[in-house]
Amino acid sequence: MSGNEILLNLDNNENLANSELISGLIELGKRDKDGKHDWNQHPITAKCLSDLKSRIPLMNSKNVI
């Protein structure tokens, strides 16, 4: 899956399970080996990170680690 496909899936983050959201963000980071993008500022990933932070109290220890 390309980085653009991952971003398209992450844009629908409200419907993703915790593990899917975490895996998508990790895979997206792996696609940017040169560090060309600031994922904290990207509109889609910033929205996902905010959503992920709000889900932390509901996650199990495996997801949080």
Image (tube, grey):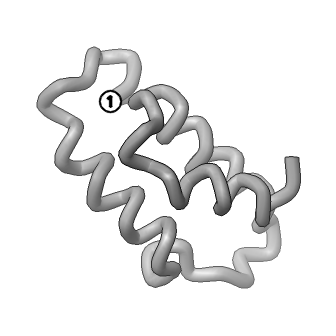
Extreme-left residue of the structure: 57
* Residue at x 70% of width, y 46% of height: 27
**How far across and how far down the image is residue 35, in percent?**
71, 76
* Residue at x 53% of width, y 60% of height: 11
Which quadrant of the figure has residue 60?
Answer: top left
Extreme-right residue of the structure: 1
Q: How many marks?
A: 1
**Position above or below: 1 against 65:** below
Query: In the picture provided, is 21 more to the left or to the right than 35?
Result: left
Nearer to the camera, 16 or 52: 16
Which quadrant of the rendered structure holds the C terminus? top left
Query: In the picture provided, is 10 more to the left or to the right than 8?
Result: left
Crowd around label 1: few <14 · some 14–19 · many ≥20 (10 Å)? some
The amino acid at mark 1 is: Val
**How far across and how far down the image is residue 50, in percent?**
28, 60
Query: In the picture provided, is 31 more to the left or to the right than 8?
Result: right
Nearer to the camera, 10 or 41: 10
* Residue at x 73% of width, y 83% of height: 36
**Position above or below: 16 against 63:** below
**How far across and how far down the image is residue 56, in percent?**
21, 36
**Position above or below: 28 against 38:** above
**How far across and how far down the image is residue 49, in percent?**
36, 58
**Residue, disc 1:** 64
Query: In the picture provided, is 45 more to the left or to the right than 9?
Result: left
Nearer to the camera, 64 or 46: 46
**Position above or below: 12 against 55:** below
Q: Could you tell me which secondary element the residue under label 1 belongs to?
A: helix
* Residue at x 71% of width, y 53% of height: 6
